[in-house]
Amino acid sequence: KTLEKIVGSDQKRVESAPDLKPNSSGKRSNLGWITAALVLVMAFGIALWQWLPDDVRQTTPPPPQASIRFPVAPVVTSQQDKPGIDLAGETKTAEIGASVAPVVAPTAPAIIPSPPTIAALTSTPLKEGASICYRVLEAESLELAPLPGVLENSAEACVTVALERATGLTLTARGQGGSSQREIVAEPLPVPVAPVVTEKPKPVPPAKPPIISSLTSKQQPTGTALCYQVKHARSVRLTPQPGELSNPVADCIAVTLEEPTSFTLTATGPGGSASSKILVSPPAEALPREVKSSRLPGKGEHWVYQMRGKWPASPKRRIRFNIEQADSAWVTESMVLLEPTPLTGGSRKSDAKHPAFLSWPDVGLEFNPWIGAYLELSGNKQWQDFATPAIGSWGDWFSKAEISGREQVQVPAGSFDAWRAEVWSSRRATDGTTMAALEPVRIHFEIWYAPLAKRYVKSIRTLIAADGQELERDQIELISHGVD
C-alpha cells in the first residue's frame, strides 16, 4: 500500500508536469504498475521462504536484495524548492532497496541428564542374613553385588540377602545420565552360643596305698637273693643295693653280702608309699672261695637284656643268658632268644679273665661279659691284639681295649655304678670302592660293667663301613638279673 501511495503521488506529479505527460501517441506509461507487480512477487517469495522448514532454510540462501527503479515526476516549484528535480524536464529515477534477512527460530540448549541418585542404603541384621533397604532417584536398572544381583527397578524397596558372615555389598543404579554406586557392609545376627553345661566330675576314689606282701631272703650256693611281692605300686626300690628295680610286682634279686646287711624295700604308687626292712646275713656254711665270692657268677643266675638297632626296620630283641657252670676262670652259659621269635642260641664256654669276643646267633659279637667280675678294673687297664672273629667273609681284625673311667648308668634294671670300657676293632678294606658302602672295616664297643650285676649292664656296638658311614648301631640294656 505504501508503494501504491508513492506510485500514485509520482503519477500525479508526472501528470501535472507538462514535460512528463504521455508521449505524443496518447498512451500512458505502465511503469508504475510493473513496479508494483514486481514488489508483490518479491513479497510473496519472502513469505514463502519463511514458511519453509528450518533444515531447508539453513541450507537455502536468503532471497537477494530487491532493487526497484521507477520514474519520479519532478515537483515544479521555485528553484529553491526543487533539489531533486531536473528543471529541464528530465525524468529522475528513485531506487528503493529491500533487504529481507531470514528469520531463524532460536535453538533450545541441549539438556544433559544427571546420573541416578542413591539417596539411602541401609542394612538390618537378620537371623541368617540381612535386610538391605534402598531409595534411588532417576534409575532405570538396579543391581546389588555380589548377591543377589539384578533388583526390581523400584524407587524405594527392601531385599533380603542370605549371609553367613559380614560381607561388603555394592548397589549400582544405572540411568540415561550414567551410573552411581554405593557400598555397605552387611552382617547377620550373631549365632547364640549355648551355655556350656559342665558336668560335675564324679569323685575319684582314693588310690590304694602300696602293700608289701612279702620280703624274704633266699640262700643260694652262689649267694643270697631277696624275694618280694608288692601290690598297688608303680615303682620299687631296694637299698643299699641294687637300687631301682624293674618289676614293681614281684621278683627275686641277687645281692652281694660281705657281712650282715639291713635292706629296705620301698614301694611307691598313687596312694602313697610303703617300706619294709629285712636283715640278711651271708651263709654260715663253708664254701669254696670262688663259689662263695659275691663277685663271681654262679649256677642258676640269669640276665635278661633288651636289644634294639639304629634303623626303624631293625628288629627289637629280648635275650636271656643263663649260667650253666662257673669256676674261678671259666664260665659256661647258654643264650635263649625270647623275642621276637623264641630261639635257642646254644651255649658258650669263655675265659672269664682275658679279653675275647663271643659270637651269638641273632646277637652278633659280644665282648667278654665277665671281665668286670673276674678282674679288678681300674682307669689304666688296657688290652690289645686279642683274637677277633671274622664277620661273614671279612676277617683279619686287629683289636684293642681300655677302661676309660667309672660312672653312674641308668638302665631298665635300675641305676648302677659301673666301669666304662671301650673296644676298637679294625681291618683293611679289601673289596674296592664298589663295596665301600657295605664292607665293614671298624667296630667300636662302649661297655658298662657293674660289679653288683656281675655282668655288663649296657653295651653300644657301632659297625662302620669303608666309606665312613655307620652300617649299624646296636644298644643292649639289662632288664633284670635274678636267680632261678
Image (tube, rainbow, N blue to C red):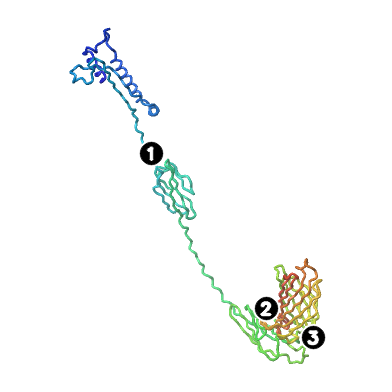
In front of the other: 251 or 19: 19
Q: Which residue is mark 3?
A: 329
- From the top left corner, tell me how far across and down residue 112 is, in percent: 39, 40
Q: Is residue 484 visible?
A: no
Category of crowding for the residue at label 2, using alpha-carbon neighbours closer than 10 angstroms: few (below 14), some (14–19), many (at least 20)? some
How far is the residue under mark 3 from the one under mark 2? 28 Å
Furthest-top residue in view? 25
Residue at figure coordinates x 73%, y 92% from the top left: 284
Q: Is residue 247 left or right of residue 152?
A: right
- How crowded pointer 3 is (Cα within 10 Å; few <14, some 14-19, many 20+) is rated as few
- Mark earlier in primary sequence (3, 2): 3
Quadrant position of residue 355:
bottom right
Is 429 above or below relative to 161? below
Q: Are marks 3 and 2 in contact (CB under 8 Å)?
A: no
Distance between mark 1 and mark 2 Cα atoms: 100 Å
- Which of the marked residues, 1 or 2, is nearer the chain's N terminus? 1
Residue 68, horizontal then vertical, whole percent: 30, 20
Residue 217 location, x and y as percent? 70, 86
As helix, strand or loop, the secondary structure at mark 2 comes to strand
- C-alpha gap between disc 3 and disc 1: 125 Å
Which-is-in-front pick, marks 1 and 2? 1
Crowd rating for badge 1 (residues with CA inside 10 Å; few <14, some 14–19, many 20+)? few
In the depicted structure, whether residue 332 falls above or below residue 5? below
Give whichever of 442, 447 is nearer the camera: 442
What amino acid is at disc 2?
Answer: Val
Tell me which label, 3 or 1, sits earlier in the chain. Answer: 1
| Residue 420 rendering spot, x and y as whole percentages | 70, 81
| Residue assigned mark 2 | 411
> In the figure, is residue 216 to the left or right of 52?
right
Dot 1 corresponds to which residue? Answer: 111
- Tell me if residue 367 comes above or below residue 133 in the rendering: below
Identify which amino acid the numbered label 1 is placed on.
Ile
